[in-house]
Image: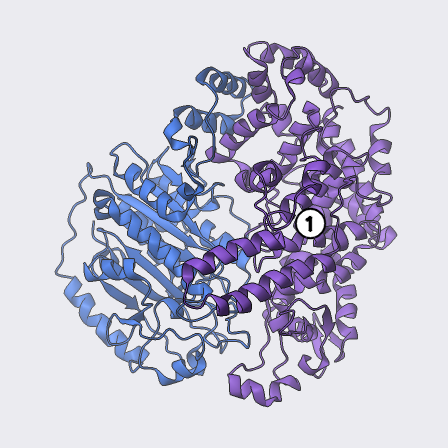
Amino acid sequence: MKNFFRKVAFGLKPDEKEPSDPLVWAQKQVETIPEFSWKGKYILSEKEMRKYWIKQRVEENTTLRKKYKKDPAGLRRAERQLRYDTGAKFWPSNEICIRHTEGVNSNHPVLGKLWYFWTNHFTISDTQSLAEFSTGAYHRDFIRANMDKKFETMVQEATVAWPMIMHLDNKENVGPKSESARQEWRRREKRPATLNENHARELMELHTISPKAGYTQEDVIELAKVMTGWRPKWSKKSDNGTDVTFDSERHEPGKKIVLGKEYKSGRKSLEVVIKDLVNHPSCREFIATKLCRYLITDNPTTDMIAPVIKAWEQSDGFLPEVHKAVIKVAFEYNDKFRKFQNPENWWLTTINMSGATYSYPTKVKIMDSYPLGFKPSGTIQFPDWMLEDIGCHPYKQKQPNGYSDLAKDWMSTELMIRRVMYAKTAFHKYNVRDQIDDNLHEKIVRTNFDNPEKILKILSKAKTNEEKHIILFNLPEVLKA
Amino acid sequence: MKISRRDFLKGTATSLFLAGFNFPVLASTTRKKNLIVIMLRGGMDGLCAVPVIGDKKFEKIRKGILIDDPIKLNSDFGLHPKLKGFNECWNENTGAVVHATSIPYTARSHFEGQNLMESGGKVPYKDKTGWLGRGMNLANLKEDGLALSLPMPLLLRGVPKNNNFYPTDGKLPREDTLELLRSVYADSSEEELLDMMNFIKKRKSEQMMGGGQSYDQRNNKNLAMKAGQVLSDPNGPRVAVFEVNGFDTHAAQGGIDGTHTKCLVEMDTIIQNLKISQKTYENSIILTVTEFGRTIKKNGGNGTEHGYGTAVFLAGGLVKKSQVHTDWPGLKRKELFDGRDLNATIDARSIYASAMSTVFDLDFKRVEKEVFFGDKLQNLSDKLFKA
């Protein structure tokens, strides 16, 4: 049964009392969205963060390039300084501190783990400096903030949010028959108005109905037409950093047909089409399968998925109900299925079970004392480069489909070396008193395993506490929950 | 471009006839031959890398992202001028291009496409192994695959005990610790974990980044140098796989200094640095794979959309000669796939199968049957490679 705490959360701390009713304990956590447990001063909104993005973009592309036209070395220096000034090397770590505190230093780790699921579902991959400034805030403002609402609301907001529109190039999606297409400057600058299918395709393929729904290229094109015009307005002062609005001049006129249904021209249609996509049977099946795959097993059975789909149908996709349903399935299948944990969730399990949460995530005091304009210290940057090194950085996915949830994709010599190395790193997150506490590992094991004797016997072969740590957190029982 | 499809076929007939005089040399069994695959993720634009030349209409459609001053490869095709490494291969008669080719996938999704370019199948996500892994398995090559990336790509799956290299910071724990973990995995029948732990135990500390070595160690340039080294070892791996990301340039694809160019140059750097190890290069086929090409027409954001036909680069001492091998479909509107993309007239899997047949000394028919599910493929071994 104790495995359940690793399955839906990150295990228990060495001194944590085991909840008497694990299912109720887990389900209660997803009912509401509490404030962030991170108490640092920088929890800035996506819009506030965009100011830094704008500063970076505008100064880099115009001011500096003009100023250092003939001095490439000077330009490089100035660019480096600019990145310190805008906090490009600080924000990702600060965001990860907020993110990971939810997992290991809050009273709702289950909500945290599901939040990570959704941030991966609505991946913003690493382009256009979004990772440095915006992705973390996007995950807070548009994903987490909607986890107590209907899935439809989440899709509506996640779709037209500025980082997503930027990430999937919808600002370039212009109706070929739109008013804008006829404007003189397009001929002059040889920038004809064309559709950009990127966002439309991913909205169907990755975010809602998946290819299983059987849509065609024609559907993609038609949906792209529906999406024309949703973009930030470019200005010299803020580059593409203005709010996303509906620009009717760029909108393709005329009706569009997506999956056999007709949509009118205009701003309202995107909302309607999203509503239809979300209510498509393939959508709930796709999401239910993904949720089961994330928490329970690489290959969910129809019996596992069915109760989640049912909860979806009964609640009209109300996420707390959908989450409760999948938690219940995870509970029921707890003993029969083990789920290989991705590197980020494994790291958090390691930190949480160790009880080293006093030094990871980096302390609020340290993060808050960082002055913009300086090179951040190694301690401050640790979360950022650690996640990159273990191959699971939530803001630096290479592609919009995010990270895989399959064990196969997390198995390789190098990825295993990372687990060995970072179990060691986790040990050194302890203060000296804990490092020399010879009873600590027994406490961890007794709190977290149903078969403590077997595991203690293995650990007894290790010669040092550091070695015990490496072994313990690389046991199959921890790698798979 | 002046040649039409019919002209081209006439040309092929001649060379086919001539090819008949070349008797295949029996493969020596002692020679260690290598296959190196570079995966180009995001959809590599074959017409950016290897543009047709002298086609006014093409130049017009691509204005803004057209590559100026391509290196002339022959009367019909040019090479992106920044691909200096490949150009060197070409000049040494060991670089070739297959053009207007693609995997048989036309639905334009990256993720389905990449899944298929690695699995070699026709139904996305159906096959859990890669064509290269299955080919190695058929040739009985175990412990012979090396991925130069952090995860193990699908492409190599299907044969046990592949290794990868993508160094991290620090020093590995002592041998006893690793041995203890190894025995735990052995006792709990965790086969995959056990295989990996066996590799980790062989890993030497100089293969880590401890002691002040920088993260540069894991850029593709240095990974290629490293791969060149280990492949030249007679007991080293025989297959290496690289990845280059970022070819999906819907916006700001750019011309000579654009994003697409940057990605192509990264591919070129891999070829260049593999070549440093001459022994490896001489005994290898280097080939590229991608999920699809890109639209001929540029979009309003100076980018291109997902397309179909593209180009495959071939390099190495086992490449028969420098050539652009193609059954050119033409770029007139009616000749395009769906009226928008370069068509594909050669199943790219024919190239993969021929390369494996050459490097692994496997009968082509067997590769076709057991690796590519019996799909009808073209044996290009004699045209493209030498044993």
> Looking at the picture, how far across and down is residue B330, in whole percent?
37, 78
Residue for point 23% across, 55% down: B319
| Residue B357 or residue B48, whichever sits in front | B48
User: Residue sitting at 76 percent across and 79 percent down?
Assistant: A264
Residue A213 seen in the current view: no
Q: Is residue A337 above or below residue B223?
A: above
Q: Quadrant of the N terminus of chain A?
A: top right
Viewer-proximal residue among A20 and B266: B266
> Percent from the top left, x then y, of residue B384?
25, 58
Quick one: A431 or B159, which is closer to the camera? Answer: A431
Chain in blue (letter): B
A17 lies left or right of B368:
right
By what rule are the colours in the image chosen? by chain
The amino acid on which the numbered mark 1 sits, given as a three-letter code, is Thr
Instruction: Report the residue marked by disc 1.
Output: A119
Relative to residue A39, is residue B92 drawn left or right?
A: left
Q: Position of residue A170 (x, y in %)?
A: 63, 69
Could you tell me which chain the residue with mark 1 belongs to? A
Picture quadrant of residue A231? bottom right
Quadrant of the frame with the C terminus of chain A: top right
Where is residue A253? Give x, y as percent. Answer: 70, 83
- Left or right of B355 in this view: A12: right
Left of B217 or right of it: where is A183? right
Which chain is drawn using purple?
A: A
Q: Do we see residue A356 in this rendering?
A: yes
- The correct choice, above or below, for A343 with respect to A123 in the image is above
Dividing the picture into quadrants, the one containing residue A86 is bottom right
Label 1's element?
A: helix
Q: Is A274 located above or below residue B148 in the figure?
A: below
